[in-house]
Image: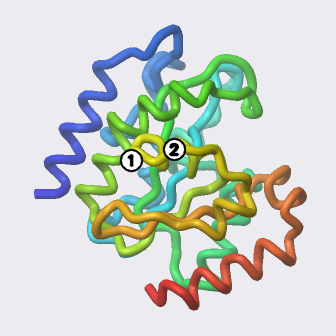
Amino acid sequence: MKSDRLLKLAQERQNSRLNSYACVGDFHGGIFEWDCVSPWTKSGCNVDAKVMIVGQDWSSAETLSREPPDLESAKLGFSPRFPTNANLDVLLARHFRLRREQCYLTNVFPFIKHGNASSSIPMKDMVACAKRYALQEIGIVSPSLVICLGVATFRALRRANGLKGSPSLVEAIASPFQIKPSMVHCVAHTGVLGMNNRGRAQVDEDWAKLATMTAC
């Protein structure tokens, strides 16, 4: 069963370490840990979803170490107030008539980076995790459409799938690729920086075209 295979993958992540990165369970007695590759999946865990959303990473060591801990994120797997989530929910509803719980959500990098939420992750580490986890999640869930939030996530999945190159955001949006049976598309990251850099009107147009093109 899909759920059994995903649980096995989650347990592999829970029992693994990558270089000097932290793990989800390292903070506040493990309150953020959950039996999925990424805690974000708690908010969207439809294993038969036609649409999968893949973000870059879930959180940072600085964020998870805060006192008091964010109990809302621990309970829900996300913060509804965080712009990445708020914008994603609006775009999913507007263009696909979907709620996040009807989708499958995950992150390409399931470990916890040092620093704050905007800290970067080396591409080699993202690719390694994409090969180890995200590609397997896509294969198990088998959605029709995989939406990558941001060009870094898209590049990591491309390289993990054996494709070379570092397309710009504009090039990535125009260059979907296939991980059978799924088509993998790129959109601007739904955080503040991604939305502002692409332009909110253009982001809305990108999602409208994607919905029309894929008809999920």
Point 51% across, 16% down: residue: 22
**Where is residue 107 drawn, in percent x and y?**
49, 45
Residue 57: image quadrant is top right
Point 43% across, 51% down: residue: 41
**Where is residue 47 drawn, in percent x and y?**
28, 63
Q: Amino acid at mark 1?
A: Asn
> Which quarter shows the C terminus?
bottom left
The residue carrying pointer 1 sits among few (fewer than 14), some (14 to 19) or many (20 or more) residues within 10 Å by Cα, namely some
Label 1 close to label 2 by CB (< 8 Å): no
Q: Amino acid at mark 2?
A: Lys
> Which quarter shows the N terminus?
bottom left
Point 71% across, 55% down: residue: 189
Total numbered badges shown on the rendered structure:
2
* Distance from Cα at disc 1 to Cα at disc 2: 9 Å
Residue 110 in the image: above or below residue 203: above
Residue 165 in the image: above or below residue 172: above
Q: Nearer the viewer, mark 1 or mark 2?
A: 2
What is the secondary structure assignment of the residue under circle 1?
loop
Farthest residue, direction left: 1
Q: Is residue 161 left or right of residue 77?
A: left
What is the secondary structure assignment of the residue under circle 2?
loop
Residue 63 in the image: above or below residue 7: above
Q: Is residue 161 left or right of residue 9?
A: right
Q: Is residue 81 visible?
A: no
Residue position for label 1: 161
Q: Is residue 45 left or right of residue 196?
A: left
Camera-nearest residue between 93 and 32: 93
Residue 132 in the image: above or below residue 165: above
Residue 25: image quadrant is top left
User: Which numbered marker is on residue 164?
Assistant: 2
